[in-house]
Amino acid sequence: MSCSISNEVRLTLEVLTGALSFMFIIIGMLYAVRGVFLCVFLMVAIEAAGQDQLRIASDLHALGRESDLHKIPVVLFFSSAECEYCELVRDEFFNHLSTDPAFMDRLLLLEIRIDGNQPLLNFNRQPTTHAGFAEQCVVELVPTIQFTDGVGELLVEDIVGLGTLAFYGAYLEQGIEQSLSALRLRD
């Protein structure tokens, strides 16, 4: 008995082998494309999440120039790393407010960590740290919100502590409106 394969069977096997190879290549490409889409999706998600975050202050002098140019107040959120109330205010109000188009053209908002040693240029271009600047501003309790002009002069009374969460948004809105009014009255 001879073990010969007919030409038709051989041709069929070659076609099937080629088809299987092609199928594996396509499957590999689909996995690669899926991986690329997953990476792009994750990068966009991470960027979007980062955009919904309050910025940490680094150069108040530059921020002050922007404040003077646009006639809008600088709103400084003084916080500390271990403050649960600060975290609540940040999450409930400032993370969203800092990227809300309705507020972006009405205020410049930054966070200052009173227990932080991050470098900071103050409104007078003097180098300091977050903790040093908070001490200069006599901020002792957190959360504290200060509304200033472009040179760091207070425009309205600080919001100190959390008080009632239900009214905090109203206090914040009132501080923003009063700051804008105070800046307009100067012109």
Image (cartoon, helix red, strand yellow):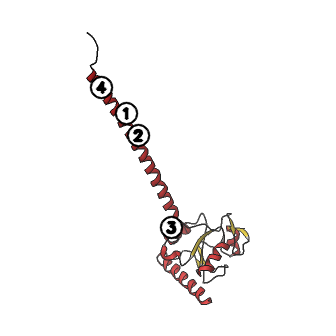
* Horizontal side, residue 163 vs residue 3: left or right: right
- Between the residue at mark 3 and the residue at mark 1, the CA separation in whole angstroms equals 53 Å
Which of the two discs, 2 and 4, labels the residue nearer the N terminus?
4
* Residue 105 visible in the picture: yes
Q: Are marks 3 and 4 in contact (CB under 8 Å)?
A: no
Residue kind at label 3, given as amino acid type: Asp
**In the image, is residue 183 above or below residue 29?**
below
Which of the two discs, 3 and 4, labels the residue nearer the N terminus?
4
Element at label 2: helix
Per the rendering, the mark at residue 135 is none
- Front position among marks 1 and 4: 4
Element at label 3: helix
* Horizontal side, residue 32 vs residue 160: left or right: left
Per the rendering, the mark at residue 91 is 3
- Between the residue at mark 1 and the residue at mark 2, the CA separation in whole angstroms equals 11 Å
Q: Position of residue 81 (x, y in %)?
A: 60, 63
In this orientation, which residue lies closer to the viewer: 68 or 52?
Answer: 68
Element at label 1: helix
- Between the residue at mark 3 and the residue at mark 4, the CA separation in whole angstroms equals 68 Å
Quadrant of the drawing holding the C terminus: bottom right
Per the rendering, the mark at residue 21 is 1
Residue drawn where x is 30% and y is 26% of the image: 13
Task: Return the residue at label 4.
Answer: 11
Which of the two discs, 3 and 1, labels the residue nearer the N terminus?
1
Residue closest to the far front: 7
- Front position among marks 3 and 4: 4
Q: Are marks 1 and 2 in contact (CB under 8 Å)?
A: no
- Crowdedness near tag 2: few (<14), some (14–19) or many (≥20) residues, C-alpha within 10 Å: few
Per the rendering, the mark at residue 28 is 2
Q: Are marks 1 and 4 in contact (CB under 8 Å)?
A: no
